[in-house]
Amino acid sequence: MSIPEDRSQGSLPAHDIEEVIGGIFQDVLAADDPVDVRHSFFRIGGTSIMAAKVIARVAARYQIRLSLRTFFENPTVGDLAKVVESEVVGDVSGLSDAEVVAMTTREK
């Protein structure tokens, strides 16, 4: 379930986690167009208050704990997706297959 490093398709999400986080960025920023996975949230108009909203939504979606500091250190969709993937992989290692399926197929 590793996020591919190859960005041959440009700025499009390369993985489901990137797609979800990109949607959260777009919603919080009230952007009309999808957010480039390589652009810093703060350089495209995000504020620290908005960042807190992103963290809350991402944490709720994946049932993980994320700090605001983590977001400041990983302010792009791509970088934050890697952090989330790492947290999710660590959290699911003790779950049954049915629990993993239930967690990953929840409505977006």
Image (spheres, grey):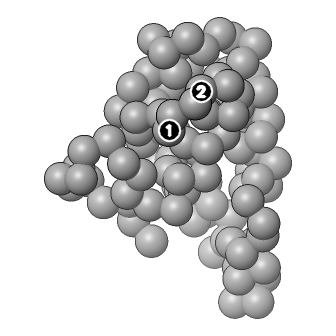
Q: What residue type is labelled 1?
A: Pro
Residue 71 shows in this picture: no
Q: Quarter-wise, where is residue 94 in the image?
A: bottom right
Q: Distance between the residues labelled 2 and 1?
A: 7 Å
| 107 to 77, vertically: above or below | below
Asked whether 32 or 87 is in front, the reply is: 32
Q: Quadrant of the C terminus?
A: bottom right
Q: Are marks 2 and 1 in contact (CB under 8 Å)?
A: yes
Question: Element under label 1?
Answer: loop
Left or right of 56 on screen, residue 39: left
Q: Which amino acid does label 2 sit on?
A: Ala
Residue 34 circle label: 1
Q: Quarter-wise, where is residue 55 in the image?
A: top right
Residue 30 shows in this picture: yes
| 96 to 78, vertically: above or below | below
Report x, y in % for residue 54: 70, 31
Q: Quarter-wise, where is residue 29 in the image?
A: top right
Residue occupied by mark 2: 31
- Residue at 61 percent across and 52 percent down: it is 20
Left or right of 36 on screen, residue 7: left
Report x, y in % for residue 66: 70, 37
Q: What is the count of numbered marks? A: 2
